């Protein structure tokens, strides 16, 4: 009998979405000698941008910061649609030679670390196991196979259609229909105007759309096109214009967040006045657009060119703030007694959180219980060797943080290689107190906060959630700080061996 050893790679990236493709590009550019593969559970790259197909799917962050630093977004469009973002990710993967490294239909179910061999063994149903020296979890933090739907009383009585945006059927015909969108977040405020625009698999859009929310969100209108980016690109070469646009937008994001946190009443007032100006005279702004929490305690909803407000002004959309008492055969009855007739209900009610794509992580035979770990620099876990995860900002563009972490990973891998080291593992400081992993009020976070790692009360165990601070810490900070234990590399026999037996 001939036995061939398990395939071994230097690095395995899990997930071929925005994070995974960007991280792979960093490896291609900076560490071409490292052998790696990208494992993707689905049959396409793009993550969110190939999975979600609901009407109007778009970014809720400006593309000059959501795009990669090493490959700037070239259009003046600030809030881009899903197909444009997917094309951008595809083109990036092709341009940097990453596309050929993606292994589709490879769902990681278990990753087991062995300290003796200094390797991860990756279990992938339907495929031979892989081993790798370093594991990069770039699968985001929500479940791709299941969106969140709360208990909806009487739903089985409803005679119409119910769909969750995460499982949208592109063939669904809503032309001329009465639609209720349940929710108040980014997906809901995107769906309402989009479903009125005439892409409902028929001749026109929905007849009327009601956004039904239990409580409101802050909604800010921004230009669909970045005028500054457009002007700079007209007069300056891209090599100058792109970094300037990116720097301007990063500064805007940081300023908005910091002012919101320090002067919440002032920002609340600005947002209220902007909503009043955008809506019909006498509109009840304080009921429908004035949340009980302060600005940026949850993510703010950005709407391009005020399209949500315009839909309300034109009378084709409205917002109802109330609680559902029960579904009926023809719609929804609310606690106030009001009934909303509906042919189609869209449950834009959120996501289910899931770390590492649901894969089990085991270290030396012991399953890792995430709440027992502490996050190091928002990218590694105490007691878990040679594993980095990618989670972007909740108060800014996701990719800003991903780019920084990918740059740090390159530094770390280079440090290990150049010094003959095989292991980097953060070791928890018992003097650092615990804090929730994400200080963020969104429902999808609060529902799962007890299942997540902890963060600490001071650096490097504290998440800054501030690009300027992280850029200095991750780009300029030392890799070999006191919180990380390094172990010399063990020697392995040649990877491919044949043995008779």
Image: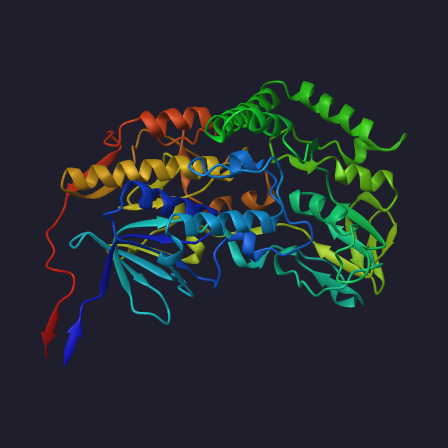
Q: Position of residue 118 (x, y in %)?
A: 19, 51
Classify residue 175 as left or right of residue 399: right
Q: Residue at x 74, y 44 (%)?
A: 214
Q: Residue 415: horizontal and vertical position, in percent?
A: 21, 37
Residue at the limit of the structure toward the right, as seen here: 282
Residue at x 82% of width, y 49% of height: 335
Q: Nearer the viewer, residue 458 or 260?
A: 260
Q: Quadrant of residue 262?
A: top right
> Which percent across, then down, holds residue 286?
80, 30
Report if residue 150 is visible in the image: yes
Q: Evaluate whether residue 149 shows in this view.
A: no
Work out whether 32 lies above or below 233.
below
Say which of 77 and 280 sits in front.
77
Locate residue 29 relative to residue 490 in the image: left or right.
right
Image-based side of 473 in relation to 264, left or right: left
The one nearer the camera, 3 or 182, is 3
Count all numbered tags in the image, as a single digit. 0
Which quarter of the picture shows residue 30?
top left
Between residues 135 and 100, which one lies in front from this camera angle? Answer: 100
* Quarter occupied by residue 25: top left
Q: Quadrant of the N terminus?
A: bottom left
Q: In which quadrant will I find the C terminus?
A: bottom left
Tell me how the rendering is colored: rainbow
Residue 208 place in picture, x, y as percent: 85, 52
Residue found at the very far bottom of the displayed protein: 1
Q: Residue at x 79, y 67 (%)?
A: 157
């Amino acid at each position: 009998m001939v036995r061939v050893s398990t395939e071994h790679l230097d690095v395995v990236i899990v997930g071929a979405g925005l994070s995974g493709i960007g991280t792979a590009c960093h490896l291609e550019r900076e560490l071409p000698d490292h052998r790696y593969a990208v494992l993707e559970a689905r049959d396409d790259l793009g993550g969110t941008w190939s999975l979600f197909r609901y009407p109007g799917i778009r970014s809720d962050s400006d593309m000059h910061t959501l795009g990669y630093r090493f490959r700037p977004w070239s259009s003046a469009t600030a809030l881009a649609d899903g197909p444009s973002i997917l094309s951008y990710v595809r083109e990036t993967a092709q341009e940097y030679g990453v596309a050929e490294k993606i292994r589709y239909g490879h769902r990681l179910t278990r990753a087991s670390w062995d300290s003796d061999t200094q390797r991860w063994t990756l279990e992938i149903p339907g495929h031979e196991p892989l081993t790798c020296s370093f594991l990069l979890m770039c699968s985001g933090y929500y479940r791709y196979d299941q969106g969140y739907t709360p208990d909806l009383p009487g739903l089985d009585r409803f005679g119409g259609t119910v769909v969750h945006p995460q499982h949208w059927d592109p063939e669904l015909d809503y032309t001329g229909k009465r639609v209720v969108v349940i929710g108040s977040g980014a997906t809901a405020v995107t769906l309402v105007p989009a479903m009125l625009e005439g892409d409902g698999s028929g001749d026109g859009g929905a007849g009327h759309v009601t956004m039904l929310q239990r409580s409101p969100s802050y909604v800010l209108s921004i230009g669909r096109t970045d005028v500054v980016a457009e002007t700079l690109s007209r007069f300056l070469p891209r090599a100058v214009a792109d970094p300037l646009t990116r720097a301007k937008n990063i500064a805007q994001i940081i300023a908005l967040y910091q002012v919101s946190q320090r002067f919440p009443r002032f920002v609340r007032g600005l947002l209220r006045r902007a909503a009043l100006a955008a809506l019909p005279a006498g509109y009840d702004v304080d009921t429908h657009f004035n949340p009980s929490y302060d600005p940026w305690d949850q993510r703010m909803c950005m709407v391009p060119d005020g399209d949500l407000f315009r839909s309300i002004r034109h009378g084709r959309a409205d917002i109802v703030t109330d609680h559902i008492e029960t579904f009926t055969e023809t719609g929804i009855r609310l606690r106030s007694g009001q009934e909303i007739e509906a042919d189609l209900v869209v449950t834009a009610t959120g996501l289910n959180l899931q770390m590492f794509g649901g894969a089990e992580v085991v270290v030396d035979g012991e399953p890792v219980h995430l709440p027992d770990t502490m996050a190091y620099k928002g990218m590694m876990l105490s007691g878990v060797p040679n594993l980095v995860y990618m989670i972007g900002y909740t108060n800014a563009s996701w990719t800003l943080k991903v780019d920084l972490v990918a740059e740090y990973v390159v530094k770390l891998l280079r440090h290990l290689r150049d010094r003959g080291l095989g292991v980097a593992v953060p070791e928890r400081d018992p003097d650092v107190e615990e804090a929730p992993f994400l200080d963020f009020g969104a429902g999808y976070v609060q529902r799962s906060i007890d299942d997540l790692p902890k963060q600490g009360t001071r650096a490097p165990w504290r998440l800054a959630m501030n690009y300027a601070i992280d850029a200095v810490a991750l780009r300029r900070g030392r890799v070999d700080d006191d919180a990380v234990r390094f172990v010399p590399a063990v020697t392995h026999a040649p990877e491919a061996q044949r043995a008779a037996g």
